[in-house]
Amino acid sequence: MMIKKLKNIKLSPLITHLIVTLAYPAVRAFTAEKNRLLLFSNALTIVGLILMVVGIIYSMNLHGDFDVSRYYLRRGVRSFRFFSPRQSEELKQDREENPAEFMREMKEKREEAFNYPLFLGIVYVLVSVLIAYVFL
């Protein structure tokens, strides 16, 4: 199953995530006067741990843990007249769609998703441990 998920990695989002998440550790290392590799490793560890926390929350979302809450929150927001100018049309549409249909549609949307934050967080922590124990 894990190999199946790794096949969903797309190069463009991966490169974007790499550039954004490696910006702080790289800048931190280049602006340091001493111990550049140590500071890079420390910053990479911090960024990796933050990405792992975000990735765990995103993983919960990908597994559908928030689908029922999202369904009822969406229905509740649409029931207020000042949030929706076409209230009667949307309420009719919501009444026709039950939670099971909504969760099935959400699951179909998530089938091809990949958890880049969790993947990169694990890779960053492993790289920082490797740097710390091999090079320092």
Image (tube, rainbow, N blue to C red):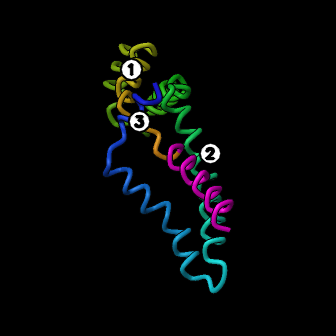
Q: Secondary structure at mark 3?
A: helix
Cα distance in 3D space between marks 2 and 1? 33 Å
Residue drawn 37% across the image and 27% down it: 111
For the residues labelled 3 and 2, say whether their Cβ atoms are less than 8 Å apart.
Answer: no
Residue drawn 35% across the image and 18% down it: 92
Q: Is residue 66 magenta?
A: no
Left or right position of 66 against 49: left
Residue 55 drawn at (x, y percent): 55, 42
- Circle 2 sits on which residue? 53
Residue drawn 67% across the image and 62% down it: 132
Q: Is residue 127 magenta?
A: yes
Amino acid type, residue under disc 1 in the picture: Asp
Q: Secondary structure at mark 1?
A: helix
Picture disc at residue 6: 3
Tell me the magenta residue range: 118-136
Cα distance in 3D space between marks 3 and 2? 20 Å
Q: Main secondary structure of the magenta part?
A: helix
Q: Quarter-wise, where is residue 66 in the image?
A: top right
Amino acid type, residue under disc 2 in the picture: Val
- Circle 1 sits on which residue? 94
